[in-house]
Image (cartoon, helix red, strand yellow):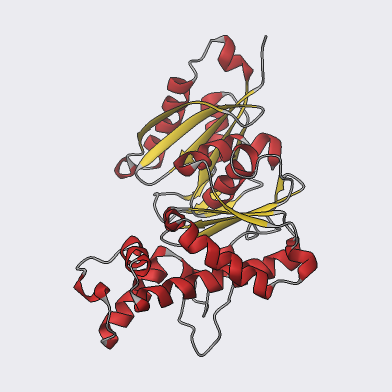
Amino acid sequence: MSQALYVGVDLGGTAIKVGLCNADGQLLRIYEGPTQTDRGTEAILNNIAAYVRELVPPDTDEWNEVQGVGIGIAGFLDIPNGIIDFSPNLPFRKVPVKEIMQEKLGKAVKINNDANVAALGEAWGGAGRCVADCVCYTLGTGVGGGIIVGGRLIEGFSGMAGELGHMAVVPDLEAIQCGCSQMGCLETVSSATGIIRMARDAVERGDRTSLAYVEELTAKDVFDAAKDGDEVAQRIVSRAAFYLGKSMAAVAIVVNPQRFIIGGGVSKAGEFLFSQVREAFVKLTPERARNGVDIVAAELGNNAGVVGAAGLFLRA
């Protein structure tokens, strides 16, 4: 019996990952190949087309069942028109990706921000499955996010909805400038970059910490030191967790989600981080907005992007 199928593309600066999903958000199989950014825009788009055909060979019954191809891309996008205005990791400037890829593949195409599609993937086929209202955070080099309300991805009129890393949550006297030029963004304290910066600042101040003996600091080093009882590392983790919980408190009274989902490399710290985030959230959120709300880890890992991109045809 035939079934509707959807292809998702996670377009990264190094690799292109493509996945095939069914209408329930189940990832059936995956294929990955190099992006080859040095070869230019046309080569990258040709690679996407080639990898999609490798995943689902044309002129097959399965290809005929593909309803569309969704593409997740980091950068500034004109989502309704399917245009990449600018991408920091790709040689794309004002490229009409939707139009070009529809011509190459002969299938309907949608594009969206990479953080949005990762959030949609978790909501559709991961930790948010069967939850209509959820908010996803991705804690990595920066802080990405996505908001799902009524099972649908919220984009906003200019595509900026869900840019959770750029909520100004740090008070002025403690705030530093974010890469977006604002002061006190969540990204400056709760991303891997922010955690490493706070650790380096502590070492430079001469604080007594085992982190002073680590040559190439990572966020994992900070969490490991905190778990081992290093007081400086514990303060850094507590600060990152507090402002993450504070941002959730603000989101909770605007969106009132049932679930917050945390993914990305920093989330691998597990309950040591999550318990402190929950504590801050409960402390700062009105009772009606926090009752029944849970804060959980993402489930799909690096596959969230391809699942969410495929889901653009059903959930966006």
In the image, is 167 to the left or to the right of 16?
Answer: right
Q: Hey, which residue is sitting farthest front in the picture? A: 229
Where in the figure is residue 314, as x and y percent of width and height?
70, 35
Q: Nearer the viewer, residue 314 or 263?
A: 263
Tell me the residue at 54%/43% (across/down).
Answer: 96
Task: Count how many numbered circles sit on residues in the image.
Answer: 0
Which image quadrant for residue 207? bottom left
Tell me the residue at 60%/65% (across/down).
Answer: 278
Tell me the residue at 75%/72% (across/down).
Answer: 286
Q: Hey, which residue is sitting farthest right in the picture? A: 288
* 79 vs 18: above or below: below
Q: Hey, which residue is sitting farthest bottom in the picture? A: 173
Answer whether residue 179 is visible to the viewer in this image.
no
Q: Nearer the viewer, residue 146 or 256?
A: 256
Quadrant the N terminus occupies: top right
Quadrant the C terminus occupies: top right
* 293 vs 215: above or below: above
* 31 vs 9: above or below: above
Which image quadrant for residue 165? bottom right
Which image quadrant for residue 237? bottom left
Where in the figure is residue 156, as x and y percent of width and height?
70, 57
Answer whether residue 233 is visible to the viewer in this image.
yes
Where in the figure is residue 202, as x and y percent of width and height?
32, 81
Tell me the residue at 71%/64% (across/down).
Answer: 252
